Image (cartoon, coloured by chain):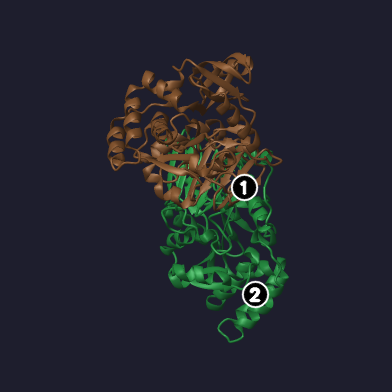
Chain colours: A green, B brown
Amino acid sequence: MDAYAVVMAGGRGERLWPLSTPEHPKPFLRLFNGKSLLEATLDRLAGLFPEERTLLLLREDLKPAVEALEPKARVVYEPSARDTAGALVLALAHVAHEAPQARLVLLPADHYVNDTQLFQNDLTAALEAADPPHVVTLGIPPTRPETGYGYIRLGARENGWHRAEAFVEKPTYATALHYLQSRQYLWNAGIFAFAVPTMEALLEAHLPEHYRAYRALRAAIGTDAYPEVLAEHWATLPKTSIDYGIMEKAPHVRVIPARFGWDDVGTWRALERTLPLDEYDNAVAGTGRHVGVETRGCVIYAQDGLVATLGVSGLIVAQLGKTVLVADKERAHEVRELVRRLENGQAS
Amino acid sequence: MDAYAVVMAGGRGERLWPLSTPEHPKPFLRLFNGKSLLEATLDRLAGLFPEERTLLLLREDLKPAVEALEPKARVVYEPSARDTAGALVLALAHVAHEAPQARLVLLPADHYVNDTQLFQNDLTAALEAADPPHVVTLGIPPTRPETGYGYIRLGARENGWHRAEAFVEKPTYATALHYLQSRQYLWNAGIFAFAVPTMEALLEAHLPEHYRAYRALRAAIGTDAYPEVLAEHWATLPKTSIDYGIMEKAPHVRVIPARFGWDDVGTWRALERTLPLDEYDNAVAGTGRHVGVETRGCVIYAQDGLVATLGVSGLIVAQLGKTVLVADKERAHEVRELVRRLENGQAS
């Protein structure tokens, strides 16, 4: 199957501050084994997709960062951030220009996956199930009452997949507990497989402005007009996500429960879910040094310095140069609020 | 009164790591108003003692650090650390060589005092009360059940002082509570006033080795033999404190309750006792920046970087370059244990 992979590297990862910054956003973070999340994603895809059918979408201002990585992919630059539906339009135009009937899998650049073989098996199954008019998504069986993700409600089982009954927004804690216990809900990991004509029809039906941009871009690719057409349509394209703009409205969606271990690496707590813990349940990462006395259940990231902890538990401590974050682990998702304060120049 | 001041700058301040290091020990720390503790001490003495009667005692290896300060004092170098009784012997020899009947006040270089005028008044009173054979000490009325200090038991009141009934070692918490509530105990701040002959007699009676060193040094001062005599006696001088070696045994001790606010600046918690607190009871110091969200009752020291805190309370966070300490405030005195681990190269 001559399918394409489209990797979306638009994540900012504000909650991973101070490691993530606008110039060094989440896909470029080297949290695991010294390899950036983006490189790890491309490595996982390499066995299934040749470089010429692997598209990497990211904002133009990240050109220096991505060129330094020399990614094994065709890089397509977005003039500015237009959320995932924007990235989809641009990627679809490039794929359709070359292969109007091709199937593609769309996925984020900055997630953690624990098993490449299982991941590739599931992607292959998703592409195979993506016969028009179906969109196939990989759903992650939840392992905790997570309130930070969207969920997919499982419908009837058919062959190797289920019908997706609904895409639901981020739940309250009580609802998340119910979802977890019911076993009828999977996490929406933002991984979608479909054929070009399937998505063309969905864009036309649900996102008319995006569809117009798509048609104009597809016609302009390979011509001198491309930069101008891109700039023109991009300027007015609304910011919309694939989930909200398309998936919640798409009538024919299949979902395959993923077999691989997955994490969105959304907050510092991701480290304790993905790294081996020490005997006191601390997750310690980074190339710096940590020395702890009676330190339990902490997430410690020492980028290039020394973090010493004494008599503390349940904290996130992240050191990068002369900057340090100390946060209650339970409030890892609020790090974004700190970043806002820093931007506004507020003190404590 | 042509009295002398002897400032002992032998404190290491290990519990103030990472700010304190062997090369940059406690007297050199700039915790308050950008001035080192040592400079603040010398400034407080300047109104009472001219530079030529102010002796500053510290280890020879700190010569570069002290010369950079250009202290307004006569610096006397100790070849190595010999505790406070060693510093006393060396200082007494220098004073006695010039003024065999002089009175002197001996005090640590690295304490915090909140009111220079009251401090000078109390020192003057101590020197006046120091007629032989009396040693006079300034005791600090306790404000908490501190287990980290020695105490002085108050005896009968005489004029402007009390007889000191006993010097007692660091108490347990229960005992410290009793001392505090009884109002019969003062903190031993290590500030002593006496005349040269008084201390000569006490050394002869209680520390014979120190007395021999004292006599040899006094005879050698001003001669070419001084460096050799100093090296010879210093090598074998036992490490003893003034408190243990002399004060606990001295028969004629007077104690004056200090009127100034005092802190030994022994741990990071000293900052919350000496600095104005913000509206959330945080003590924030250093020339770096702090940004906090829902941060309460913390001691934050940002030397030259950025400390960001989120949803934490009762912590010490101290940043210096790429090194950071995060500790439970209640365990501030255990920072020394961390330093030991670092020296031994142990990880968490």
Q: x and y percent of residue A63 in the render?
A: 53, 72
**Residue type, mark 2 in image:** Tyr
| Residue under the point 31% across and 34% down | B234
Residue picked out by circle 2: A214
| Element carrying mark 2 | helix
**Which of the two residues, B158 or B244, is positioned nearer the viewer here?**
B158
Does the CB distance between marks 2 and 1 fall below 8 Å?
A: no
**Picture layout, residue A180 above or below residue B123:** below
Q: Which quarter of the figure has residue B25?
A: top left
Q: Tell me which amino acid carries mark 1.
A: His
Label 1: which secondary element: helix
Please provide percent x and percent y for residue B255. Answer: 56, 21
Q: Which of A261 and A71 is in front in this view?
A: A71
Identify residue for label 1.
A333
| Measured Cα–Cα span from mark 2 to mark 1 | 35 Å
Q: Residue at x 40, y 24 (%)?
A: B200
A43 and A243: which is toward the camera: A43
**Mark with earlier residue (2, 1):** 2
- Tell me the number on the disc at residue B181: none
Instruction: Determine crowd level at label 2: few under 14, some 14-19, many 20+ residues with C-alpha closer than 10 A.
Output: many
CA neighbours of label 1 inside 10 A, class few (<14), some (14 to 19), many (20+): some
Which chain contains the residue that carries disc 2? Answer: A
Residue B280: give x, y in percent of width and height.
69, 39
Q: Residue at x 33, y 27 (%)?
A: B238
Looking at this view, is A235 or B87 the one in front? B87
Going by the image, does A327 lie left or right of A117?
right
Asked if A253 appears above or below B302 in the picture, the reply is below
Q: Residue A8, how many percent across, how many down?
A: 56, 64
State whether discs 2 and 1 lie on one chain. yes
Asked whether residue B115 is in view, the answer is: no
Which chain is indicated by disc 1? A
- Mark nearest the camera among 2 and 1 is 1
